[in-house]
Structures are given as C-alpha cells and as structure tokens.
Image: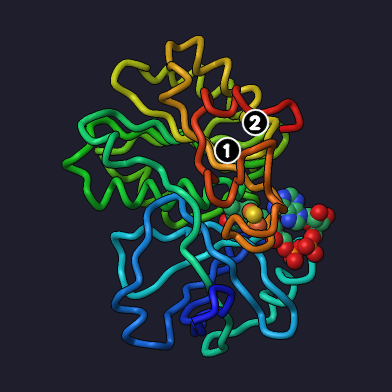
Amino acid sequence: MNLYTPHPVRVAEVIDETVDTRTLRLEFKDPAFAESFDFKAGQFGEYSVFGAGECTFCIASPPTRRGYIECSFKKVGKVTNAMRELEVGDTMGFRGPYGNHFPLDRMEGDNLLFIAGGIGLAPVRCVIWNALDLRDKFRDVTIVYGARSVGDLVYRRELEEWAGRDDVKLWQTVDPGGETPDWKGEVGFVPSVVEKAEPKAENTYAIICGPPIMIKFTLPVLIKLGFTKDRIFTTLENRMKCGLGKCGRCNIGPVYVCKDGPVFTAAQLEDLPPEF
Ligand SMILES: Cc1cc2nc3c(=O)[nH]c(=O)nc-3n(C[C@H](O)[C@H](O)[C@H](O)COP(=O)(O)OP(=O)(O)OC[C@H]3O[C@@H](n4cnc5c(N)ncnc54)[C@H](O)[C@@H]3O)c2cc1C
Ligand code: FES
C-alpha cells in the first residue's frame, strides 16, 4: 500500500471543547485495520479532509482505549476549518502513527508530573490517561494545567474527573483577568503555579507541553526544583508535510522532528542548533 494513502475513518463523536477547539472521535472503517491498529502515547498522525488537504495532530486518546482514536484541534486555517464542517457519520482520512513516544515504560515506579498550557493538554492528556489506566505502575500523579481564561480550558469533564480522584493532584489555573466569579482554581501563569505546587524532583519525570513562552519560563522553575534535563520531556510541533522523514520540511539541523521526535528531553533540545 502507498505510504501516503490515508485510512478512511468515520467521525463517531464531535465534542466542542471551547469556542475554537473541537475533539473528534474517529473509528477506522476497515474492521481488520481497526483491530490491528496500535500506537504509543506521544505519537501523531496526518489527518485529511478529502478535497481540503492534510494536517498534523497528536493522537489525543490513549493507546489503552482501543477501537477509536481522538484528535483535538484548534481552528486556524484551511484544513482545520474544513474539519469543523464534519459531522457524526462523515468520513475523513488518517495515516500514522508516526514519530517517537513518551517512554512510559521507563517511568514505571516513579512519580509523574504533567504540565500543560492551552491546547497543549492534547498530547499530555494521552499520556495522563495511559498512566491512569495503568495506575498501579506509577507513584504520585500531579497535573498542572493552565489556560488564558476559564472559557479556554479544554477537556472540562476530564478535569472534573481528575479533580475528584484521590490518586491525582490537579492544579488548574487561568491567566490574571481570565477568571470568572465562580472560578475556584488558581489565578496566575503556569510557571508560578508549578513553583507553588512544589512537586518533588526526586524519582519524578516531568512531561510538559504548551506555548513556547510557557515552556521557556517553566523549565528554569523545574531546574530550580531539582529536575534534571534528562527527566523533562516535551513534544514539538514543527510544520510537517510527509510525517515520514522524506520531505525535509520539519528538520532542525540534522534532526527530523517527525522521525527523531516529536518527543524530546530538555537535554536533547539544548543540543539542537540555535534555529530552534
Ligand atoms: C507533531 C504535531 C502535533 C500537533 N498536534 C496538534 C494538536 O493536537 N492540536 C492542534 O490543534 N494542532 C496540532 N498541531 C498543529 C497543527 O498541525 C496545525 O495547527 C494544523 O496543521 C493547521 O492546519 P490548517 O490547514 O488548518 O492551517 P494552515 O492553513 O496550514 O495554516 C494556518 C496558520 O497556522 C500556522 N500553522 C500551521 N501549522 C503550524 C504548526 N505546526 N505550528 C505553528 N503554526 C502552524 C500557519 O503558519 C498559518 O499561520 C500539531 C503539529 C505537529 C507537527
Ligand atoms: S515532515 Fe517530511 S521530513 Fe519530517
């Protein structure tokens, strides 16, 4: 089969997360392919709307939940606008999974700290559910999630579920001015809430995804708390085309983000050329 041929998927559910962000639950139309399909947390795919084109999203649902995949996307341009037109029962395309993944196997027996901003929660949500579905394998699970305003928080039902669990510590925050009168979470930027949460660095892995500015100011906080750069993982979103290491669209120096990434440690990012 041609590597670029998408597999037809049926839109099984449409969930509005915010005014401009939507989640689609997708089911493979070929039952044999659906049965054999597997991936790891952190991998991504190329999603296509016939006649509009392809775009890249992480797989936002965990590999522990079989029979479907989910993607969450922000409406920004041609393909994402076309995806907004899709309804339950419509067909679109998916090819993947591509890229490397978060090494959850290596993290077993340790604490997990998840830090996300805005729609950056999509790839992190995949790892969170993956870990929670295998809860006995991990120690403390802490989540720090921030958005610009209360209306920009994604996965609201899941945030409520995590907040209600006694085996998860959830810190939610919105930027100053983004709170509503009934907001019970923190008000402040993600890095300062991480500082306040004071997660212990010992035997802990940090997984972080969000706007570059959030990552830039959160990294020094983690280092100050004692995290080493090889225990801090993030995922990059460089513009991609093939997703397969063939077109050269996504590279940073010698590194192909689609093949060598998208998951990197803070130590690996430090070694990349300054164009990053
Ligand atoms: C590995 C990976 C995972 C991703 N996961 C998600 C996800 O889970 N949810 C999500 O909403 N988005 C995600 N993205 C970004 C997403 O691919 C783009 O937003 C999408 O391709 C835009 O398609 P479009 O045709 O609607 O926009 P276009 O019409 O192509 O572009 C609209 C605008 O968005 C900008 N843009 C397009 N792609 C990117 C990009 N990769 N980075 C920065 N700016 C871009 C363009 O420069 C332009 O200004 C991911 C990207 C990568 C590489
Ligand atoms: S997207 Fe084509 S080489 Fe990475």
In the image, 165: left or right of 142? left
Residue 19 in view in this figure? no
Q: Depth check: give the residue in front, 159 or 13.
A: 13
Q: Depth check: give the residue in front, 131 or 54.
A: 54
Q: Is residue 28 above or below residue 64?
A: below
Disc nearer the start of the sequence (1/2)? 1
Instruction: Report which residue position mark 2 lands on.
Output: 214
Local secondary structure at mark 1? strand
Callout 1: few (<14), some (14-19), or many (20+) C-alpha neighbours within 10 Å? Answer: many
Q: Position of residue 242 (x, y in %)?
A: 64, 63
Marks 1 and 2 sit apart, C-alpha to C-alpha, by 10 Å
Q: Is residue 169 above or below residue 71?
A: above
Residue drawn at (59%, 74%), measured in percent from left and top?
A: 4
Point out the residue furthest to the right here.
Answer: 77
Local secondary structure at mark 2? helix
Q: In which image quadrant can residue 18 be found? A: bottom right
Q: Where in the image, quadrant-wise, is ligand 2 located? A: bottom right
Q: Which mark is residue 119?
A: none
Instruction: Report which residue position mark 1 lands on.
Output: 146
Q: Position of residue 56 (x, y in %)?
A: 62, 61
Residue drawn at (30%, 46%), measured in percent from left and top?
A: 131
Asked if the residue at tag 2 contacts the one at tag 1, i.e. Cβ–Cβ closer than 8 Å, the answer is: yes
Point out the residue furthest to the left here.
Answer: 136
Residue 213 in view in this figure? yes
- Looking at the rendered structure, the kind of residue marked 1 is Gly
- Looking at the rendered structure, the kind of residue marked 2 is Met
Q: In which image quadrant can residue 67 be found? A: bottom left
Q: Position of residue 151 (x, y in %)?
A: 64, 51
